[in-house]
Amino acid sequence: MRLSRYFLPVLRENPAEAQIVSHRYMLRAGMIKQQAAGIYSWLPLGYRVLRRIEDIVHQEQARAGHIPLLMPTLQPADLWRESGRYDDYGQEMLRITDRHKRDLLYGPTNEEMITDIFRSHVGSYKDLPLTLYHIQWKFRDEIRPRFGVMRGREFLMKDGYNFDIDKDAALHAYNRHMVSYLRTYERMGLTAIPMRAASGPIGGDNTHEFLVLAATGESEVFYDDRVTGLKLGDRVVDFDDRAEVAGICKEFTTLYARTDETHDPALFDQIPEAHRKVGRGIEVGQIFYFSTKYSEPMGAVVVNDKGERVPVHMGSHGIGVSRLLGAIIEASHDDKGIIWPEGVTPFPVGIVNLKQGDAATDAACEGLYKALTAQGLEPLYDDRDERAGAKFATMDLIGLPWRITVGPRGLANGKVELTSRRTGESEEMSPEAAVDRIAQIYAAHP
Ligand code: 5CA
């Protein structure tokens, strides 16, 4: 992509309405535009990151054996009358009436609809286990939408639903989600800690939230700081192996980590003082096991191996896809702008031409552009006729993790400069070596 042809409406001034750094940088970097309170357009740069995050979510769900589908944003109210949640959900639910005076709603979550799909097509234990998920827009008429995409009214969520024959099988599905989420967040450069939580309107007793530590987080968290050192890494996990998956969950949930909703001061005080931490966190996901809460009233039953009709055991599992952009920026930025982790960056590398119009620098930039593109590493080439300072400021603001700078002085010696956005360190090398290095770096981020 050439910046001269792209649509990147960066703002020079700090927008007054943005109270936290992620919101400020998303507006300044031309990633989003607010259209109404808590409702945003995703401009090209923001949309690229959103899609990267969706890709990672899809890949890790596939790895765990979960199956994608797509349900609509609008749902008939009657489904929610069956579960009893139509009245319970209150003012957060956006209710709509169509021309035939039928009650609809913009889905805040999909337990009812997925249960309806299941009961229409599945009748035997032989079709279990089954986990279906989608990535779809949700609407919750939050009383205080704020912090940009962090607490929106319209927001993108991955929500998955497991159907199992009994509690043990459903708890395995719960554990499978926990492990798949650990890797999902790690690939985005995040440390997201599973914390025992409260279930709210979704229901059930077993639930964990995933929290990214950040001073601007909306949840108060209490934890043993050794939990932040745990990593799943690139371990090969057999998601069908109940003991292995449960073992990983135990590893990540044994140290104390709770939100204020479930905090137990007596237990907390048993942690050695040096490791006892109180902080704030951003909730980027939540998993639930709620047994037969929806299957029973909605008649989602299967015939078991003894020929009896039994309601299926279910859970639901959510990732805040659009919120993740904010969480990643909160966790990774400096005073010049965003610092994207390689896993989610909108472009793997930027090219800055210090002397646009100079035959040698233009040719070298074109060469880099072609070589990187040929390797599937689409660069963002700043080919505008701008001062070097302005080009650097834009690159720093939008946060691509690597920058190749091409100027007449370096080129005279056959060199360009490769700079890390995170460390600020630069290294001179030939254009070919720079391309190789970028390819090497991204080999670890498919
Ligand atoms: N049905 C369940 C699991 S699929 C569910 O709805 N869970 S949830 O309520 O916890 O939402 C899942 C995730 O969506 C949350 O962890 C959070 O990351 C994200 N989320 C929730 N509300 C908002 C909001 N107003 N703006 C942005 N993201 C949100």
Image (cartoon, helix red, strand yellow):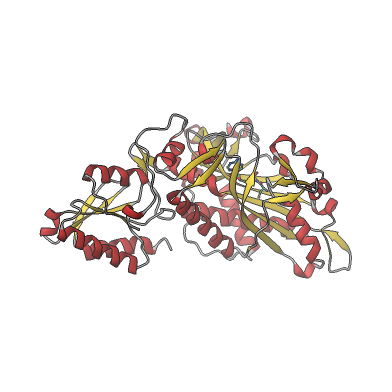
Work out which residue is located at the far front of the displayed protein and give it. 99
The image quadrant where one finds ligand 1 is top right
Q: Could you tell me which residue is drawn at 19 percent across and 59 percent down?
A: 429
- Decide if residue 391 is on the left or right side of residue 89: left
Q: Position of residue 66 (x, y in %)?
A: 63, 63
Above-or-below relation of 281 to 237: above
Q: Nearer the viewer, residue 289 or 422?
A: 422
Q: Could you tell me which residue is drawn at 20 percent across and 62 percent down?
A: 364
Above-or-below relation of 144 to 427: above
Q: Could you tell me which residue is drawn at 82 percent across and 66 percent down?
A: 123
Q: Position of residue 122 (x, y in %)?
A: 79, 66
- Decide if residue 300 is on the left or right side of residue 436: right
Q: Quadrant of the C terminus?
A: bottom left
- Is residue 242 visible in this depiction of the protein? yes
- Is residue 192 visible in this depiction of the protein? no
Q: Position of residue 33 (x, y in %)?
A: 48, 41
- Decide if residue 235 is on the left or right side of residue 139: left
Q: Position of residue 224 (x, y in %)?
A: 52, 39
Q: Quadrant of residue 154?
A: top right
